[in-house]
Amino acid sequence: MAEYDLTKTIIPYCDRHLVFPLLAHLTESEIFPVEQVQTAQYELAKETNMVDYAVSLFQQLHPDQEVPAEFAEKREKAVSTHERLQQEAQAVLDVIENPEVAQSLRQDKNQNLQFLRDHYNVTLDQITALYNFGKFQYSYGNYSGAADYLYHFRVLSTDPDLTISAHWGKLACDILTGKWDVALEELNSLREAIDSRAPSMPQFSSSTPSSSAADPALAQLHSRTWLLHWSLFVYFNHPQGRTLLLETFLSPTYLNTIQTSCPWILRYLATAAVLSRKSASGALSSRVRHSIREIVKVIQMEEYQYQDPVTQFLKELYVEFDFEAAQKELGKAETIVANDFFLGEFREDFMDNARYLISEAYCRIHQRIDIGDLSERLNLSRDEGEKWIVNLIRETRMGADAKIDLEKNVIEINRPPLPIYQSVIEKTRGLAFRTQALGAAMSRTQQTLAPQEVTQPSAVEAQ
């Protein structure tokens, strides 16, 4: 189902090196012709310093042609550049790895710089050499080495732009080396920097928009958009990633970013909600239940911009209550999840939790349910459906309300009516928080408009 593949959509928001795993996945899944994917890999690799990798891709594409001489020249240039940058960075690294120096460093970066300048003659240019060498190591695929140098640079540097760029580079290195706990910490610190309106576009990426530099708000929107895409690598590999994704993506700022600039992220938001639905933790289940409601509302609003079988499954289930349509969309969604780079390993969990959602919704609006009919709606055989439903009733709170009549092959549900006071609590849940958030937003708007009101008369007088 190539029409639902999001690789082409996601690539513009990823660094060049983060794209290599995406293209490798396309080669394995065979969604697109292998030659086209290999061509894309070659075009991507030849602009980096991974010369040997680019040569191997060229030989795969053109087995009858000689390797261009430019690769040999590029390799020699890369080796000489590596030696030069290593010498420049090693002088600083020898100083900061000295145990006595490490004990003398403090939280204040300016104080640290003064200390290094006075006692070891270390200048700002020498500290920047750490960044340059780390960036060069990243360009030829030595991600663990690049992470170390970028970390040391970030600890010492007072340049805000290069520090943020080192943040992005360190996050990319942690992703590519599979250090998910460290990558999660880096992701959270980078998100804090972006939310504080620091200039945080990844400078090492050639596809970074430059038009946003003049507008801090637009730069912040673009930074959050990039962060949403990069975070998918972390959230779908970290053990707690799906829950953390929901908490981050459903926050007002990032939900607004999704709706404004990247509505296709709704696929991953919806999938994370489905995957997190059936949990052993009661508090988590309650929070996720309300998250699904919010996601469904967003899916309805953004349907004109983006829709796929994953989002349509939730819409048909919770908005239209069309179980036959939900069943069809779930069949398509299974293929999409299986072929998606981030979601492939969660296919079985996704289907298991999706069937749970269908069963829960179906049982909520029916008092007498035919087991065979429900099994068909779950895309299961009659025997598999019976086992599934028995386990569902045993594991969930439905057991107190549901009884299975094996002779008639039906489930009878006797659900007591919800007390009025409980209905009021459900309707007003979170009202105080939403009111407080609205008041804070209005206060910020007034503070933003106040300086404009003050400066406007002077502009009129000048005319």
Image: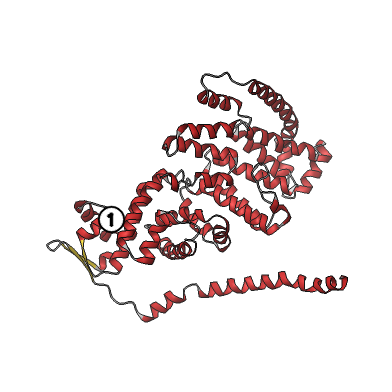
Q: Is residue 178 visible?
A: yes
x and y, in percent, of residue 292 in the image:
43, 62
> Which residue lies most toward the right here?
462
> Which residue lies most toward the bottom here?
420
Q: As drawn, is 263 to the left or to the right of 444?
A: left
x and y, in percent, of residue 421 in the image:
39, 80
Quadrant in the picture for the N terminus: top left
- Give the answer, above or below, for where 212 lies relative to 102: below
Q: Name the residue under label 1.
A: 378
x and y, in percent, of residue 324 in the image:
30, 60
> Which residue lies most toward the left here?
407
x and y, in percent, of residue 51 in the image:
61, 26
Work out whether residue 421 or residue 12 is closer to the camera in this orientation and state it: 12
Work out whether residue 335 or residue 137 is closer to the camera in this orientation and state it: 335
Quadrant in the picture for the C terminus: bottom right
Q: As drawn, is 264 to the left or to the right of 136?
A: left
Q: Which residue is drawn at 81% across and 36% down?
A: 120
- Give the answer, above or below, for where 445 lies relative to 374: below
Q: How crowded is mark 1: few (under 14 residues within 10 Å), some or many (20 or more)?
A: many
| Kind of residue indicated by mark 1 | Leu
